[in-house]
Image (spheres, rainbow, N blue to C red):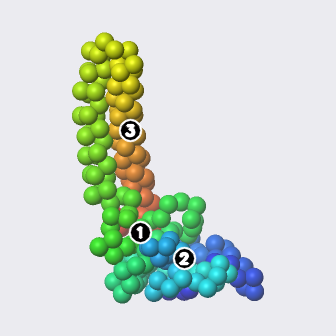
């Protein structure tokens, strides 16, 4: 493991992205509560010039380090990237098990979104039927407006879940490619 400042004007090359090798991985720590970049123990950096990342030679090494750090300091979150850096979404996001709900692709978050979407659809159907049979123009328009908006909101939630699942599939493929096809984790 190597700790590198993201930008060090006294170093050649100055940027960490020019130092990392194609088969290496970078881990970035941030405080879960504030979102501020932090060191491996969750302490914020004094200023932006001191922000650093951890460079690893293997994904397993990076994952093990991050899981150990999160076990020591539950308020820290690690994102592991391949050599392309932050150009792509992280390969892995490591958080304390008690804070798993903060990860976007967590199964419970997807399930909750799906349940809410179907509840909105169930509420929209009788609202639209009610709007259809109403004879008062003003109330009919309002009920129809509410029913259609419930359907649109449900559709957006379901579409968002679909996008998250596709992003997760691409992430799994990137992990497999980065590790030579030997590792497929969540």
Viewer-side label of 3, 1: 3
From the viewer's perspective, is 71 left or right of 115?
right
User: Residue under circle 3?
Assistant: 153
Check the picture and name the quadrant holding the C terminus: bottom left
From the viewer's perspective, is 17 left or right of 143?
right
* Contact flag, marks 3 and 1 (Cβ < 8 Å): no
Looking at this view, name the residue that lies furthest to the top. Answer: 135
Label 2 and label 1: CA atoms lie apart by 14 Å
User: Residue under circle 2?
Assistant: 37
Callout 1: SS: strand
Say which label, 3 or 1, has the lower sequence index: 1
Would you identify the image quadrant in which residue 185 lies?
A: bottom left
Q: From the top left corner, tell me how far across and down residue 55 is, in percent.
A: 53, 80
Viewer-side label of 3, 2: 3
Foreground of the two, 144 or 84: 144
Q: Residue at x 27, y 52 (%)?
A: 111
Foreground of the two, 171 or 43: 43
Which label is found at residue 93?
Answer: 1
């Amino acid at each position: 493991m190597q700790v590198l400042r993201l930008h060090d004007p006294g170093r050649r090359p100055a940027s960490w992205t020019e130092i990392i090798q194609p088969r290496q991985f970078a881990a970035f720590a941030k405080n879960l509560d504030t979102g501020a970049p932090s060191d491996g123990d969750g302490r914020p950096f004094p200023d932006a010039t001191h922000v650093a990342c951890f460079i690893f030679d293997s994904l397993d090494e990076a994952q093990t380090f991050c899981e150990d750090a999160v076990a020591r300091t539950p308020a820290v979150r690690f994102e592991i990237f391949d050599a392309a850096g932050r150009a792509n979404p992280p390969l892995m996001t490591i958080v304390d098990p008690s804070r798993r709900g903060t990860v976007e692709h967590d199964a419970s978050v997807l399930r909750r979104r799906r349940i809410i979407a179907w509840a909105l659809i169930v509420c929209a159907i009788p609202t639209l039927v009610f709007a259809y049979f109403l004879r008062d123009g003003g109330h009919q328009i309002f009920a129809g407006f509410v029913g259609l908006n419930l359907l649109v909101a449900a559709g957006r939630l379901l579409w968002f879940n679909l996008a998250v699942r596709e992003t997760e599939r691409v992430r799994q493929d990137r992990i497999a490619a980065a590790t030579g096809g030997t590792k497929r984790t969540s």
